[in-house]
Amino acid sequence: MHKVGSEFFEFGYFEYTGSSFESDMAGLAAEQRNIEWLKLCDPMQIPLEGERGWAIMKPIFFNEGVD
């Protein structure tokens, strides 16, 4: 959650279950379907004032999965 003025925004959420985040993100960045998706979506993502890209937000909860 991120507060801007008197408004609160929730932008996105993901869970990572791999073992090498950096390696997996590099693979995702090279994936052609992801490249095309970002070409479509990036122009619609408007940074908040004072941000250059994704804003780091304070987590409001953490749900640890149980197998």
Image: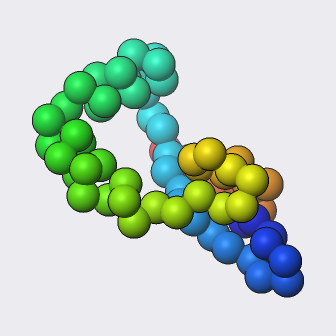
Q: Quadrant of residue 24?
A: top left
Q: Is residue 61 visible?
A: no
Left or right relative to 39: residue 32: left
Front residue of this view, candidates 5 and 22: 5
Identify which residue is drawn at 85% across, 83% down: 6
Q: Residue furthest left?
A: 32
Residue 12 position within the rendered picture, expressed as x and y whole percent measured from the top left: 53, 60
Q: Residue at x 31, y 30 (%)?
A: 29
**Residue at left offset 79%, top offset 72%:** 4
**In this rendering, position of residue 66 left or right of residue 1:** left
Residue 12 vertical placement versus 31 (above, below): below
Q: Position of residue 1 (x, y in %)?
A: 72, 65
Q: How many labels were placed on the picture? A: 0
Give how far across and how far down residue 27 sits, in percent: 29, 23
Relative to 43, residue 36 above or below: above
Q: Is 51 positioned to the left or the right of 45 in the image?
A: right
**What colour scheme was applied to this rendering of the protein?**
rainbow
Q: Is residue 58 above or below residue 3?
A: above
Q: Residue at x 49, y 51 (%)?
A: 14
The picture places residue 46, in percent across and down from the top left corner, at 52, 63
Observer-nearest of 11 and 16:
11
Question: Image quadrant of residue 42?
Answer: bottom left
Q: Camera-side residue: 66 or 47? A: 47
Q: Tell me which corner region of the image, top left, top right, bottom left or bottom right, holds residue 7.
A: bottom right
Q: Is residue 3 visible?
A: yes
Left or right: 11 as drawn, with respect to 44: right
Extreme residue toward the right, this view: 6
